[in-house]
Amino acid sequence: MIGNFLLLLASWLLLRLEKKNLRVLGLSPTVERGFEILLGFLVTAFLAILLALLLAFVAQFVWLPNESMLNSIVFRDLFNSFQTVFYEELLFRGYLLYKAITLLGDRKANMLSAVAFGMYHWFSFGVFGNPLLMLWVLFYMGLWGLMLAYAYSRTGSLALPIGLHWGWYFIQHHVFNEQGSGFFTAVTNIHTMYLSNLESMLYLRLPIIAFSVILVVFLAKLKPKVGKVSKIKSKVSR
């Protein structure tokens, strides 16, 4: 929470130096922004639930309520997951991406943000030092980061990328969690099959990659909204 506050403060100060405010990041409490967060959350939450059920079907295990989480408060987990997501969105799709778009243009800035997001997960996933896994994480998480970057640049707000990121993260970490820290935990039986890396990629990763690609292609066709106002103003002043 302190990290989020410091990032918000730094973003506000940097924007003030340019005579702008946090509205540049779309951080305004409007109905439109609320709808974007809700839409993004529901879409990726639905995708995460479908993949969790698909995994259970393919590997032949069941998701059962986790007794150790019965007393857990849903709103608390929602808030905690939001804190994590908000931090990453501010860091990778906040002021730095906004500034990169104004300096480099939309496509280059989004690609740069995606690469940085992928490299960040080398450390959060603990794969640094393993070249093969590092390459995979750079591609996989970089593509996810590219989708979120386009969600920001095409809406002019962090609301949609926050929603997309939050829905996936909440379901993966707080609802269907194979490590036993979610509301449902995986319970195996004698028929349970342990998937190989290839099978895991086929059933779990490829649908996510396909979803990310489809959304990137769709968003890329829309007109950019970040940096658009400043360009118009500069033309008028001339």
Image: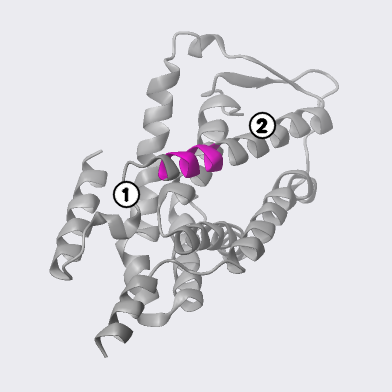
Q: Looking at the picture, does residue 26 appear above or below residue 61?
A: below
Q: Earlier in the sequence, mark 1 or mark 2?
A: 1
Given the current orientation, which residue lies at the most extreme bottom position? 238
Quadrant containing the C terminus is bottom left
Given the current orientation, which residue lies at the most extreme right position? 191
Of badges 1 and 2, nearer the viewer stands 1
Residue 128 location in percent, x, y?
48, 60
Amino acid bearing label 1: Leu
Along the line of sight, the residue nearer the viewer: 80 or 36: 36
**Magenta stretch: residue 116 in it?**
no
Along the line of sight, the residue nearer the viewer: 201 or 230: 230
Q: Residue at x 74, y 52 (%)?
A: 206
Residue 27 location in percent, x, y?
32, 49
The residue tagged 1 is: 27
Residue 102 location in percent, x, y?
35, 76
Residue 49 badge: 2
Amino acid bearing label 2: Ile
Residue 25 location in percent, x, y?
33, 57
- Residues shaded magenta: 33-41
